[in-house]
Image: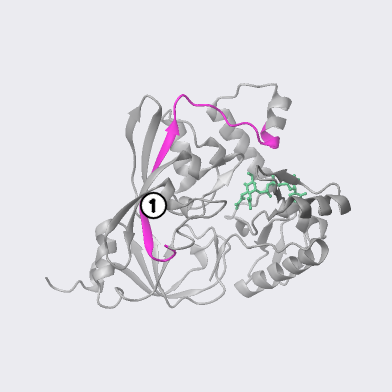
Amino acid sequence: MPAPTTAELSVERRASLRALNSFGLPAVAATLVRVRSEAELRRVIDHPEFGRAPKLILGGGSNLVLTRDVTAVVLKVEIMGRQLLRETGDAWIIEAGAGENWHALVEWTLAMGWPGLENLALIPGTVGAAPVQNIGAYGVELAERFDSLDGIDLVTGRTVTLDARACAFGYRDSVFKQLLAGKTLITRVRLRLPRPWRPVLGYLELQRRMHETGNHAPDARTVFDWVCAIRRAKLPDPALIGNAGSFFKNPVVSAEQCRDIIGRDPSVVHYPLPDGSAKLAAGWLIDACGWKGKSVGRAGVYERQALVLVNRGGAIGAEVLTLARAIQESVYGRFGIRLEPEPVII
Ligand code: EPU
């Protein structure tokens, strides 16, 4: 078989990544390859130049901080397609290509009469990125709506199918951020939407909406509208203000540490966990240190949600990291807690 040529693939040299990351940070990829199918990915793996080269997998670029130019071959995942795979008595199983836009998938499933993803509305990024960081919002995590996924091993080109257990989902975490990081490219994701549909309304702000509207039995479309309104009110639209969503994870502390912090700051927002430990609201901790609305260079802390760092215009990755470190230092200084960044930092 003749060696595949570059001409068969969509390859860009010295490609600007600025429009391909939601923070709008400048960086150049020496080589960017658009992957539109499994077959195309196999051609990359078999390719004399790209096959052995280190790779960076890029979805919507919405959970990424670029601090330098990228020498690894950037694989921009653009595998499309979405379908109802099967319908059983207790679930709808939906399959979508990794390159599909996540929010568009949520809207489509609702329009088709398959509810269950409404709490995850408006999360930026692609379907393929959703399992990587186990996206979650307003009381629902992807792991709870997950069936299985297909991926391709970037060394062998072999297709693997992983169930939830194999994905090792954790809080904003999965095997794709750990053992399989940069090794397996997710090509298709299957979601399991349980029937009959039951709304998830435990989150405080959804409770508030129910109270305000007097609607205590909202349908899925209403929950979707509420979630969109809540997000729009406090999270910046990356199309207008560069950002990567929550910049830090909410830290988990021991019961003792939590008691100690409550002793000093009784208003600290915390959520007790079953094992006695507690999750603290990182946004509250950062806010308490006076960071909301502040800037360091052209990077800033969003005025309406201190957990979100923003690009005030023309920021570079190093400025975002300088700001992030300054925040980490002040939160550590005041509370003795080390905040861990949520996005992938390159
Ligand atoms: N808070 C403050 N000041 C702030 C920000 C927050 O006091 O500046 C307080 C709020 O008043 C609230 C608490 O902190 O009592 C929690 O805030 P919020 O409800 O906004 O949620 P979060 O914990 O900051 C998490 C996720 C979000 C997700 C929301 C809703 C993480 C790291 N972030 O944010 O996910 O949308 O809950 O479920 O877990 C993302 O991962 O990128 C993301 C946006």
Q: Residue 312's x, y, as percent? A: 68, 64
Does the image show residue 189? no
In magenta segment, residue 127:
no
Q: Which residue is mark 1?
A: 98
Does the image show residue 231? yes
Magenta residues (range): 180-206
Most extreme residue toward the left, as rendered? 1
Q: Amino acid at mark 1?
A: Ala
Left/right placement of residue 166 relative to residue 27 reads left
Query: Relative to 69, does residue 289 appear above or below in the rendering?
Result: above
Residue at 31% x, 54% y: name it.
Answer: 160
Q: Residue 241's x, y, as percent? A: 63, 58
Ligand 1 under 8 Å from disc 1 Cβ? no
Residue at 74% x, 46% y: name it.
Answer: 270
Residue at 50% x, 37% y: name it.
Answer: 117
Secondary structure, mark 1, is loop
Q: Quadrant of the N terminus?
A: bottom left
Query: Relative to 49, does residue 219 appear above or below in the rendering?
Result: above
* Count of all numbered marks drawn on residues in the image: 1
Query: Relative to 51, does residue 282 appear above or below in the rendering?
Result: above
